[in-house]
Amino acid sequence: MTTSTVAVRKPVAWRRIALHLGCLAALLVMLYPLAWLLATSLKPADEVIASLDLLPSSLEWSNYKTALDGVNDVSVWQLLGNSLFIAGGAVVGNVLSCSLAAYAFARLRFRFRGPLFAFMIATIMLPHHAVLIPQYIIFNQLGMVNTYWPLILPKFLATEAFFVFLIVQFMRGLPRELEEAARIDGCGPFRSFFLVILPLTRPALITTAIFTFIWTWNDFFTQLIYLFSPEKFTLTLALRSFVDASSQSAFGPMFAMSVIALLPIVLFFLAFQRFLVEGMANSGIKG
Amino acid sequence: MTTTQIPTPARTQDVDPPTKPPRRQREGAAWVFLSPWVLGAAVLTLLPMAVSLYLSFTDYDLFNPPQWVGLRNYTQMFTEDPRYWRSVVATLTYVVIAVPLQLGLALVVALALKGMRRGKGFYRSAFYAPSLLGASMSIALVWRAIFNDGGTVDNLLGTGGWVNKPGWALFTVALLTVWQFGAPMVIFLAGLQQIPAELYEAAAVDGASRWRQFLSITVPMLSPVIFFNLVLQTIQAFQVFTPAFAVSAGKGGPADSTLFYTLYLYDRGFVASHMGYASAMAWTLLLVIGAVTAVLFRTSRSWVFYASEGDR
């Protein structure tokens, strides 16, 4: 026993070091685009292209100053506010509506529960584009195009079934005795939901909130379709107006604005990485 | 991926206290909880699906009432529209390149991290970060610049910018997907950690090599998770939009090589105002994704292994 461990130890140590070196090398390659983004946002216009140096020769803070002026006479602060408003509304809507539906699916008994649950699961796989055009027509008829309603209202109707499923899975893990105790104490389904179940579901709700925020923040397609007044634009849509511009003089400000747009996600990631990684891991295993 | 957690209804009945509200009242409560979801499913999912099916047989420009044209949108799509077929080819090529590369890398990294004692949490988070950032317009713009003429790749390899070359531009978008291998990697890692260590110990005692252990233990035990990732990533890959839009400056170029299906659908429906035609495209996409998912599920019977088969 002892001889074999001694004999094996050396190659294992080497293997471990090689593994770490490999991981670090992969990490460097993966982080390169982010480093490039940060460096380019601070580069003078003539260094962006035709220079292999990652680091700028001098820090060009004026890129950020130009970026803060925004696009189409709309300042970055307003774009940021618009993005935050949409993402915030989506978070509130998703957490509320998805947890309500999840409680019914996880704990209450009602007719057609099986088929409805199967339908809900199927909508997770439904491509967004299959419903996009009629949804657009409906919102157009309601006069809601070029408002934030089409971006926020669906979230209050639990249309993102992925999160309903996530919360259902979590609620099924909670002990039933809690609600039975609450019921003996005279709590109806509503009070036991709000007072007993919801507080215990907090981890799943936080996961839902963070993913909703990030996905809504990054969303481009829906915003592209529904919003067309520049003063209603989000950061993502404002960045889009740079897509057509091929002139490289705009590169610095464009990437400065890109950094501003990514900042909330990076901060969210740093603050909640545990929840995000665990939430993602659980989505595949418990499913 | 087991369905063992569906609660058994019998359990609640024998402990119901006498104060239990009548059944009808409780059922009413359930529908109150469900009402937002029911409304959303009816008005924002089922109704739109029916409407878009109807519209796919019409000419509709949002302003004039729809004109019934029968199957014309579909025949035009399949027989008279070369751009449609180019978008199909671009999307399928992308799915076939990006999904296996992404999942393969995710699996390799998950295996590398699995046995790691120190730094596992750090690497897991760090590798996961691009999955959150990659869908953003910011990163798509970075990608376009790095792979453009005079960008990093051009400077390093001297190949010229990839985004301007048909055949290479698509690969650029695929690389952006591969860059986001973190999400499936995290799921793989969680799956790997659920494989009982005794299985490997028993195999090692029997003298099985690591490769043999990988093939005979890891792959079958992990197959439900591989299947889950495969279905999820394939469905998502069919719908990719932002990177294609940014890399090709919204036009699907060069030479329609990155004219992804969703990009062309957007172009027909919202730029050219052919809502009927775009609806026909959307329903075709829905059917294709449904068929691909069905095929994946069908083949899964022969290679996905459920350890808890007995209690399903």
Image (cartoon, rainbow, N blue to C red):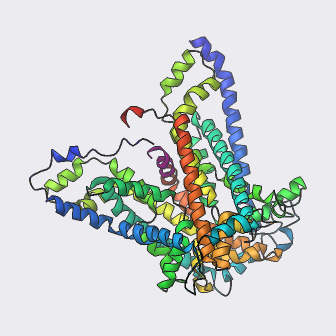
Using the image, determine if residue B206 lies above or below residue B114.
above
Residue B117 percent location from the top left of the image: 57, 34
A282 drawn magenta: yes
Residue A98 percent location from the top left of the image: 39, 63
The residue at 71%/39% (across/down) is A22
Using the image, determine if residue A46 lies above or below residue A188.
below
| Any part of residue A203 in sight | no
- B224 sits left or right of B40 in the view: right
Q: Quadrant of residue A163?
A: bottom left
The residue at 81%/57% (across/down) is B167
Residue A63 percent location from the top left of the image: 74, 76
Q: Foreground residue, B286 or B308?
A: B286
| Any part of residue A40 in sight | yes
Q: Which residues are magenta?
A: A278-287
For the stretch drawn in magenta, what is the main secondary structure?
Answer: helix
- A228 sits left or right of A168 in the view: right
